[in-house]
Each structure stands twice: as structure tokens, then as C-alpha cells.
Image (spheres, grey):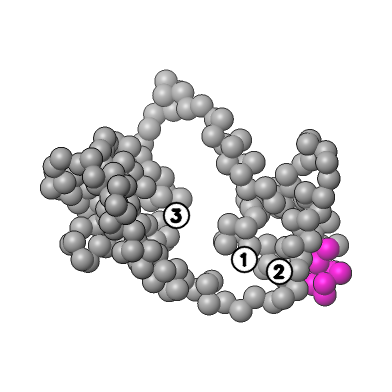
């Protein structure tokens, strides 16, 4: 989502770079807000079309077929455009494999118990995660007896964004983060020092420029 009244190609490019690097297969829907404050929509359309074309066909950018542009517009005064946005989000969501997956009831009961145990306290310093061993214990109470099913359940819930389960190392696998916002807030505190970390455009790398 970006503000078209003070649109910045560099800003949008930064987010597309991140998606291209870390979630290339994910559907991408671009939504430009404050259409009511845009004087020259055609210029914004050209700028975004030229930018997005650099990432195609690798990125799955949802096209606005009605207007023939790779983004959707929203008028913040009268709400024009919201119905089309909702329609396309629903259509795209229904096409995702995990949306149509049948989920065992015991998985959802385990999730509810995990969430309740994490917040069943008045201690403001309560950890925003649960040890994997505790998750397995909760799972056993609902009939999840194998480690492989626990892994499958946590991976599925992680894909849905209901928890965060990192598997890059054995140490990370021992913790299940149930307060996703906690991790997002922590990551947002990381300051990038441009003197130490040069920003590299993955599209330039792909094209052999770097």
C-alpha cells in the first residue's frame, strides 16, 4: 500500500526488492491510496508500470484488468476502488493451496491452548514464545503424538502467519513465537548503517549489472 499523493518510486522499489528476495512466489497486490489528491494519475501509472515490469515475470503481481495497470487505486474520500480491491483479494486468497487444506481439529485446539498459555498471566515480562517441548506436551494432550506431525502443524501455522516458527537452526527450532508483533517490533529496531552495508538491488544482480 502506497500513498499516490506523494509517490516515491524508490520507496516502492525497496519493498519490491524485499519481496523479490524473500518471497518471490507470493502474490503481490499493489494498492495506491489518496486517489482524490492525485493531479496527474497518468504519470503515476507510467512510473509504476515501468518499475513493476523490471520484476516480471518472476514476481506474481496481481493485475488490475479493469484499468489495465499493475496496481489498484483507492479514493480515500468516497471509497471508490475498495470493492474491486476486496474482490481481487478474495479471488486470490481462494486460489491459495493452504486455504483449501483440511486442518485437523486437534491442531486448532493445540493452537488455542498455546495462545492461552502464553497470555494466561499478569506478568508483563512474560516471554512472547513457547518452548518446543511445551508445544509437544500440549499436542500430546490433544492426540498429536509424533514429532513429525508437530513439525507439520507448526509449519502450517507459520505459513498462515498465526505463529512464527523458524527452522534455520536447531536452536531456533526450539522456540515457537506466539506473539508475532513482538518479533516485528524487535526487527524494526535494527538500524541499517549505509556506510557498512551497501544496498544491492537483486534485479541488478540478476541482470549481471553487479
Q: Secondary structure at mark 2?
A: helix
The front one of 119 and 101 is 119
**Reading the chain from its start, which is encountered first: label 1 or label 3?**
3
**Reading the chain from its start, which is encountered first: label 2 or label 1?**
2
CA distance for labels 1 and 3: 16 Å
- Image location (x, y in percent) of residue 87: 36, 68
- Give me the residue at 49% from left, 73% from top: 97
Asked whether residue 203 is in view, the answer is no
CA distance for labels 2 and 1: 11 Å
- Give me the residue at 73% from left, 44% from top: 128
Residue 199 forms part of the magenta stretch: no
Report the disc number at residue 50.
none
Report the disc number at residue 156.
1
Within-10-Å neighbours for mark 2: few <14, some 14–19, many 20+: some
- Residue highlighted by disc 3: 23
Q: Which region is colored magenta?
A: 138-146
The front one of 118 and 14 is 118
- Give me the residue at 83% from left, 45% from top: 121
Q: Secondary structure at mark 3?
A: loop
Residue 140 forms part of the magenta stretch: yes
**Horizontal side, residue 61 vs residue 102: left or right:** left
Within-10-Å neighbours for mark 3: few <14, some 14–19, many 20+: few
Tag nearer the camera, 3 or 2: 2
- Image location (x, y in percent) of residue 117: 81, 54
Quarter that holds the C terminus: top left
Asked whether residue 176 is in view, the answer is yes
CA distance for labels 3 and 2: 26 Å
**Reading the chain from its start, which is encountered first: label 3 or label 2?**
3
**Horizontal side, residue 28 vs residue 4: left or right:** right
- Residue highlighted by disc 2: 108
- Give me the residue at 83% from left, 63% from top: 138
Amino acid at each position: 500500500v502506497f500513498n499516490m499523493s506523494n509517490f516515491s518510486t524508490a520507496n516502492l522499489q525497496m519493498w519490491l526488492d524485499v519481496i523479490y528476495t524473500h518471497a518471490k512466489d507470493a502474490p503481490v497486490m499493489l494498492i495506491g491510496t489518496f486517489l482524490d489528491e492525485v493531479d496527474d494519475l497518468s504519470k503515476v501509472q507510467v512510473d509504476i508500470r515501468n518499475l513493476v515490469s523490471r520484476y516480471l515475470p518472476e514476481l506474481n503481481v496481481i493485475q488490475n484488468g479493469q484499468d489495465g495497470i499493475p496496481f489498484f487505486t483507492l479514493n480515500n474520500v468516497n471509497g471508490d476502488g475498495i470493492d474491486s480491491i476486496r474482490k481481487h483479494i478474495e479471488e486470490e486468497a481462494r486460489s491459495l493451496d493452504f486455504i483449501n487444506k483440511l486442518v485437523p481439529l486437534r491442531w486448532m485446539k493445540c493452537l488455542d491452548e498455546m495462545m492461552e498459555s502464553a497470555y494466561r498471566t499478569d506478568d508483563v515480562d512474560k516471554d512472547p514464545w513457547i518452548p518446543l517441548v511445551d508445544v509437544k506436551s500440549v499436542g500430546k494432550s490433544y492426540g498429536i503424538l509424533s514429532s513429525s506431525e508437530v513439525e507439520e502443524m507448526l509449519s502450517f501455522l507459520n505459513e498462515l502467519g498465526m505463529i512464527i516458527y523458524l527452522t534455520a537452526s536447531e536452536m531456533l527450532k526450539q522456540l515457537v513465537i506466539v506473539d508475532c508483533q513482538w518479533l516485528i517490533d524487535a526487527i524494526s529496531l535494527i538500524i541499517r548503517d549505509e556506510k557498512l552495508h551497501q544496498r544491492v538491488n537483486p534485479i541488478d544482480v540478476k541482470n549481471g549489472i553487479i
